[in-house]
Image: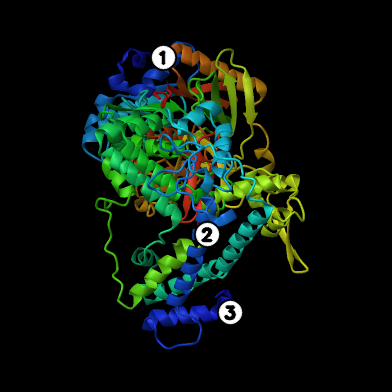
């Protein structure tokens, strides 16, 4: 299957464009059609994810036994424990232990909690926040002696093999998406970029789905007075406790959200997965500032009032092309998010593997597949100091004699896709970037968007720009998920307005307007004085 | 100024009332006079593009000539503008470096027109502040060499023990407008000792002279220099803390140094402390 797609890229372009013009199944070059490409890619992705899930639940391994409910499992939703979410009462260490071959205490989720706790207020306080009263955190068994290195190595090898099978799709998809988009734009009546975007639709990416899902819960809460009161009037920790005790339905939605989407932001960043406390905090941030209608728009449940533009309708011929574009540009099978998700699904397996290799599980992703396999096979141990240096400083890859080697950089570098600045209004938010540089741009800001602007351009009178400004109604600031600027200090008008509106904001990034583009999904982390803006999807 | 001290906030607005109190407490503020809200009501009701009545215009010019300063800053002073709940930060226009009779009248009219903008209306509605009286302050222009803003409580940790100050070369408009990442420092609220300092990138500065105001780039070698000396920083901090004591609530203070020394341009309650 993979060999077939290791062909010159232009054959894909030609095939896709041919498919778009004349529909699928037309006779054409022997290269795969768009439909075939998508199907094979999805198959490869499904296979990887299914295997990852089996690894994660301990199903794969010695004797290949399937465990009914592993420790920490959430009944009725598959055996996928979520760190940071209280498991249902009674899920104890002893239950169903037989099925869990690789599970050990902790897991990447635990690691995440530890990191989160160290970063935030107080560790004990934090741990409680995500494990509300009386609930038991998953305490997993030690690796059973039976699941030895050989089994681990074999399973890891299989996982990496399946991952490698997805690589051609991952590599080709962005290129294909670009070709399809060019063709679509050319075929539209006016060919205007803005119209094209609304006609084709944005790719329905994992990060965007995460956002909409969370805002949907917030929207539901905004219409339920009892839930609204709990979410608004208490700390995130208290809210989590009370939701789990008093409104299990809402709490279950938060749990589900984390199971489905919690991994998203770990892709391309050094961030731990979303915790329940953070999810609750983000809901609070939104609900404190939004009326139900705004929350509805952000959740995608309501149309923005008076803002919906007539959308150019696509011809029947173009519709399949648009659908292909959405998939190519955003869908899981094609993005690096696939590997992130696979790693998340199988995190308990990798936890066990890390244990066997004698390193902290957080370090494992910084080793190459070859290094992991060699360590599991007992050929060459992992070098802890080197992995730590790679984690802290980044690394470079070198190919020599057919092998790829990773080397830690000597000096720390800012991870790509991360901007730093000063938090001027505390909070955390995820949203879609809208860059506003002049008065005509102001209207495009929708609820839940991240306003990105420079602040540094004076008005025509040589006065500093007033904020909000440039055609942005000040109410739009309140509905923004977050504000990010190139310049500006803690005492600027912009900072004051953001604090009054409780919009999480990072100012003074120096390069936000040159790095960020409309449509990117970013996380704005203004929880500490040193604020960060992380590109989740570009 | 004596009159402003007597006049109620409803007729002179928050900014003028606070300037009058500072002056009465012997804190140096630039000489100023107020065009009262009652006098401007007609102009505001006429909508944008209106002109001052001749009697009012001559009264304004009389006040201007009485200041004895050719260049002035024209600023809004609205009731509710500087309340502790909502600062109206930057919602109304301020016009700096105005000189000449005709320019002054135009500037007063323009500042009034800013009260009618949609943005101001929207901000007022969303912050729940009633549309109140709108007065205008005409203040002698300080040709500042360095300037900035001081909050007597750190805005991110309002319950802590520190205050926060930002500074840039030129006038304070670059700091207020967020046009630069300024120098900043934190200080102890008890004792006014400087705790930490950072040098900002401050790529530009806003400057003002008799010909008006402008934004100019700051030469790279100057950007790395601290705006304030240790003594200057301590002087501003001490002044800020004294103002908080005077008003008995946390203050948002705009300050400036010119060749004559330290001036306080305005002081208002610090917002965003509720939570």
Query: According to the image, label 3 marks what residue?
Result: A7
- Residue A509 visible in the snapshot: no
Cα gap from disc 3 to disc 1, whole angstroms:
80 Å
- Are labels 2 and 3 on one chain? yes
Q: Chain of mark 1?
A: B
At a point 44% along the width and 55% down the height, the residue shown is: A206
Q: Chain of mark 2?
A: A
What crowding class fits label 3: few (fewer than 14 Cα within 10 Å), some (14-19), or many (20 or more)? few
Please tell me the numbered disc located at residue B90. Answer: none
- On the rendered image, what quadrant is the N terminus of chain A found in? bottom right
CB under 8 Å between discs 2 and 3? no
Query: According to the image, label 2 marks what residue?
Result: A51
Name above or below for residue A117 compared with residue B12.
below
Label 3 element class: loop
Residue nearer the viewer, A386 or A318? A386
- Are labels 1 and 2 on one chain? no
Where does the image place residue A40, in percent across and percent down from the top left? 48, 72
Where does the image place residue A160, in percent across and percent down from the top left? 61, 61
- Residue A257 visible in the snapshot: yes
Task: Answer with the quarter of the image where residue B132 lies.
Answer: top left
């Amino acid at each position: 299957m993979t060999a077939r797609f290791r062909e010159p890229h232009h054959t894909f372009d030609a095939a896709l464009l041919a498919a778009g013009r004349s529909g699928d199944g037309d006779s054409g070059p022997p290269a795969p059609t768009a439909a075939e490409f998508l199907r094979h890619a999805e198959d490869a992705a499904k296979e990887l994810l299914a295997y990852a899930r089996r690894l994660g639940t301990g199903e794969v391994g010695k004797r290949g036994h399937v465990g009914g409910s592993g420790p920490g499992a959430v009944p009725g939703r598959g055996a996928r424990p979520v760190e940071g979410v209280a498991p249902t009462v009674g899920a104890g260490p002893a239950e169903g232990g037989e099925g869990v071959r690789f599970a050990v205490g902790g897991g990447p989720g635990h690691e995440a909690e530890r990191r989160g706790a160290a970063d935030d207020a107080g560790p004990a306080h934090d741990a409680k926040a995500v494990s509300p009263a009386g609930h038991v955190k998953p305490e997993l068994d030690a690796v059973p002696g039976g699941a030895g290195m050989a089994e681990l190595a074999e399973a890891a090898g299989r996982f990496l093999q399946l991952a490698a099978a997805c690589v051609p799709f991952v590599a080709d998809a962005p290129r294909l998406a670009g070709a399809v988009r060019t063709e679509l734009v050319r075929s539209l009546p006016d060919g205007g970029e803005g119209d094209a975007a609304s006609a084709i639709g944005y790719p329905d990416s994992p990060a965007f789905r995460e956002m909409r899902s969370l805002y949907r819960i917030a929207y539901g809460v905004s219409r339920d007075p009892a839930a609204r009161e709990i979410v608004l009037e208490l700390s995130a920790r208290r809210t989590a406790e009370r939701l789990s005790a008093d409104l299990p339905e809402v709490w279950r939605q938060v749990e589900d959200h984390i199971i489905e989407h919690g991994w998203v932001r770990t892709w391309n960043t050094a961030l731990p997965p979303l915790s329940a406390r953070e999810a609750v905090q983000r809901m609070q941030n939104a609900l404190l500032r939004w009326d139900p209608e705004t929350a509805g728009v952000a959740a995608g449940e309501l149309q923005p009032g008076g803002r919906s533009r007539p959308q150019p309708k696509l011809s029947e011929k173009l519709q399949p092309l648009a659908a292909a574009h959405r998939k190519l540009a955003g869908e899981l099978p094609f993005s690096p998010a696939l590997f992130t998700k696979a790693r998340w699904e199988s995190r308990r397996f990798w936890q066990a593997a890390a244990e066997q290799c004698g390193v902290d599980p957080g370090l494992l992703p910084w080793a190459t597949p070859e290094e992991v396999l060699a360590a599991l096979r007992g050929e060459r141990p992992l070098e802890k100091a080197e992995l730590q240096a790679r984690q802290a400083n980044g690394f470079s890859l070198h190919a020599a004699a057919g092998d790829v080697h990773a080397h830690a950089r000597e000096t720390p570098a800012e991870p790509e896709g991360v901007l730093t600045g000063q938090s001027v209004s505390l909070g955390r938010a995820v949203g879609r970037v809208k860059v506003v540089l002049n008065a005509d741009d102001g209207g495009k800001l929708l609820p839940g968007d991240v306003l990105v602007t420079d602040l540094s351009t004076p008005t025509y009178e040589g006065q500093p720009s007033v904020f909000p400004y440039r055609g942005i109604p000040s109410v739009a600031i309140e509905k923004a998920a977050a504000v990010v600027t190139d310049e500006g200090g803690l005492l600027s008008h912009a900072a004051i307005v953001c604090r009054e509106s409780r919009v999480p904001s990072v100012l003074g990034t120096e390069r936000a307007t040159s790095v960020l583009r409309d449509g990117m999904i970013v996380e704005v982390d203004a929880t500490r004085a040193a604020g960060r803006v992380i590109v989740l999807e570009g | 100024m004596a009159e402003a001290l007597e006049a109620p906030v409803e007729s002179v607005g928050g900014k003028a009332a606070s300037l009058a109190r500072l002056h009465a407490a012997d804190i140096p503020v630039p000489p100023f006079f107020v065009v009262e809200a009652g006098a401007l009501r007609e102009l505001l009701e006429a909508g944008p593009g209106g002109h001052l009545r001749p009697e009012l215009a001559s009264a304004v010019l009389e006040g201007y000539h009485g200041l004895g300063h050719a260049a002035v800053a024209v600023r809004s002073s609205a009731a509710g503008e500087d309340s502790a709940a909502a600062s109206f930060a930057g919602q109304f226009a301020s016009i700096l470096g105005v000189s000449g009779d005709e320019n002054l009248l135009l500037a007063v009219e323009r500042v009034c027109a800013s009260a009618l903008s949609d943005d101001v209306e929207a901000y007022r509605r969303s912050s729940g502040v009633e549309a109140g009286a709108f007065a205008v302050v005409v203040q002698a222009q300080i040709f500042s060499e360095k300037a900035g803003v001081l909050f007597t409580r750190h805005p991110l940790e309002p319950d802590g023990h520190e205050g926060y100050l930002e500074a840039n070369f030129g006038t304070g408009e670059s700091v207020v407008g967020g046009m630069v990442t300024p120098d900043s420092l934190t200080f102890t609220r008890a004792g006014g000792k400087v705790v930490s300092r950072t040098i900002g990138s401050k790529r530009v500065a806003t400057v003002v002279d008799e010909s008006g105001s402008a934004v100019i780039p700051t030469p790279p070698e100057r950007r790395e220099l601290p705006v304030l000396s240790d003594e200057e920083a301590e002087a501003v901090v001490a002044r800020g803390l004294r103002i908080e004591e005077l008003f008995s609530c946390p203050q948002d203070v705009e300050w400036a140094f010119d060749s004559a020394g330290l001036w306080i341009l305005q002081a208002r309650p610090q917002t965003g402390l509720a939570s």
